[in-house]
Image (cartoon, rainbow, N blue to C red):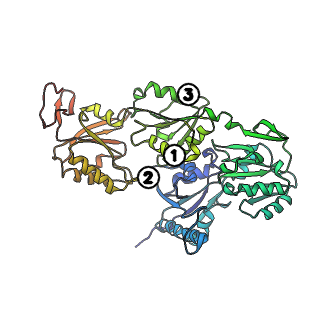
Amino acid sequence: MSTAAPGKLWGVGLGPGDPELVSVKAARVIGAADVIAFHSARHGRSISRRIAAPYMRPGQLEEHLVYPVTTETTDHPGGYQGAIDEFYEQAAQRLARHLTAGRSVALLAAGDPLFYSSYMHMHRRLADRFEAEIIPGITSVSAASAALGTPLVEGDQVLTILPGTMPVDELSRRLQDTDAAAIMKLGRTFPAVHQALSNADRLADAYYVERASTTEQRVLHADSVDAAEVPYFAITVVPGPEPTAPIPWVDTSVDAGRRVYTARTAQHADAGEVVVVGLGPGAPGWTTDEVRAVLDDATDLVGYTSYLNRVPERPGQRRHATDNRVESERAAMALDLAKRGARVAVVSSGDPGVFAMAAAVLEESADPQWRGVPIRVLPGLTAANAVASRVGAPLGHDYAMISLSDRLKPWEVVAQRLSAVAAADMAIAVYNPASSQRTWQVDAMRKLLLEHRESDTPVVLGRDVGGPAESVRVVTLGDLDPADVDMRTLMIIGASTTVAIESDQGTRVYTSRRYGRVRETTADDT
C-alpha cells in the first residue's frame, strides 16, 4: 500500500506590509500551496494574511495560529514563556499533520522569516522531519530606511539592530557604541527607548517610522512621538550618515528651541471620513447616484477584491483589496486611513447593512482609538430584492433574512432561527448558503424546513443576479438539490401563502399580502 510523500514546508517572507513588495517567488508559492498558515493575536486580525490575500486562491486550506498571549498576563503554570512554548509545540503538530499527509504548507511571515519572526520557532520543530525552504523578505529596517529616504550606513560604518525590550541601561550603552541603529519591537517599550536615546545623546538624530511601506505609514522625529499611540509595528532609526536630503515631514513649529514635526500624511486628519457604501448586487445600473458620487470623491477604496473590481479605476485613487474573510482588519484599515485624513469608501456588494461591512466598521469603531472618525452608511439594493424582482414578488409579505454561514455564529443558532421563522410562516431570504468548504448546510436547512412547510413550497434560486452569469430558477422545497447551490446563490424560500404560477414570461412567484388565501390566485391581489 503506497503512502503520499511528505509535503514541503515553505517559510514565506512577505516584506514589511505593502503587498506589491511581496517577491515573485513568494507570490507563486502562496498561490500553489495546499495550506496557508499564519499567526495572529487573539483579536484574530493577521497582518501576514492581509498582505498575502491578493496571491491566495479560492479553496486553499487555512491554519490560523492564534497566540494564547501577547503582552497580557497568563495563568499558565509555566508563565508567559511556558504558554508560548506550549503554543509553538501545538502549532507545529498542526502543521506536521498536513505535511505528513503530503500537503505543502506556506507559513506566512511579515518581513523576513528569520528576522524576529515566529516562523523560526516552527522551523526548529519541523525542518528535521520535513523538507523546508525559506523565501527571504524585505525587512522593516529596509522599509524604514526607504521611508526616510536616507542611507542607514555607508563605508565602514556599523549598523546595530536592537530590540526595544532590552533594559534601558544596556540599550543606552549599545546606542553609544554604534554608528547607526534600528530599534525594533516598540509599542509599550517606546518610553524606555526614548529614554535610552536621550541617555546616549542620540535623540536629536533619531527618527520614527510607523507601519513602513503601507498606506498607514507615518514618519516623525523620534522626539515628537506620542508614546500612547505607538504600535508594535513601528521602528526607531538612527542613521549613520547625516541626511543630505529632506526627511519627509513638515516642520510645523518651533517651541523653546525644539522643532516639532508632523507626518505629511497626518496634515489633513480632520478632513477624513469613512463612508460604507453598497454597490447593489451586480448590474452597474443598480448602484445609486449617491454612492457613485462618494466613490468619485474618495481618496481610498477599501474592500473585497471582487467588489473593488466592479468600481472603475480613477487616477490618484488608492485601492486596498483584501480577502473576503478579514472584515475586522479591513474595517481597522479604513478607520486608520480616515484618521490620517483620507476620504475612505468601504465597498460592499448589495446593501452594506445586510451581512456586509457596515456592522464590521461600526463594531471596530467602538475602539477608543477611532473616536472622532466620522462614519456614514449609504444603502444599496439588496441581493434579496434583486432576486425577488426576477420572478415577481416572493417577498411581498413578511419575510426574514438569514445567513447560513456558521463562520461567525454556531450552526445551532442558525438552525434555531430557521425553525422559528419557519414556524412563524414567513418567507425566508437565505444568504451565504454554501461555499467550497461548507457544503452540508443547505441539505440540513431543507430537512429542517420540511418539518414546517409543504414539499411543494416554491424555492427561488438566484445566482449572480445582475451579473454576466445570471441564472434564476424556481424549484420546490421537496426537489431542492443542494448541489445546485453555491456561495454566489441567494435562495428565497416561500411561505404557505407563496404561489408559483406559469405565464408567458415563465414561472412567476408571489407571496400574497392577504394572509389566509393559501395558494389562491387572483386577477388583482392588491
Q: Nearer the viewer, residue 421 or 289?
A: 421
- Quarter of the image where the C terminus is located: top left
Q: Residue at x 71, y 62 (%)?
A: 165
- How dense is the environment of label 3, judged by Cα within 10 Å: few (below 14), some, or many (20 and up)? some
Mark 2 surroundings within 10 Å by alpha-carbon count, few (fewer than 14), some (14 through 19), many (20 or more) = few
Q: Which residue is mark 1?
A: 366
Q: Secondary structure at mark 1?
A: loop
Of 368 and 36, the residue lying toward us: 368
Q: Nearer the viewer, residue 126 or 455?
A: 455
Q: Are marks 3 and 2 in contact (CB under 8 Å)?
A: no
Pair 3/1: label in front = 1
User: Is tag 3's residue or tag 2's residue first in the polypeptide sequence?
Assistant: 2
Q: Which residue is mark 3?
A: 297
- Quadrant of the rendering where the N terminus is positioned: bottom left
Tell me which numbered mark, 3 or 1, is placed earlier along the sequence.
3
Q: Is residue 80 left or right of residue 139?
A: left
Q: Residue at x 41, y 39 (%)?
A: 353
Amino acid under disc 1: Ala
| Callout count | 3
Q: Compared with residue 96, is residue 57 higher up or lower down, i.e. above or below?
A: above
Give the residue type at disc 2: Gly
Q: Position of residue 298 (x, y in %)?
A: 56, 31
Quadrant assignment, res 391: top left
Q: Position of residue 473 (x, y in %)?
A: 26, 38
Secondary structure at numbered mark 3: helix
Disc 3 + disc 1, Cβ < 8 Å: no
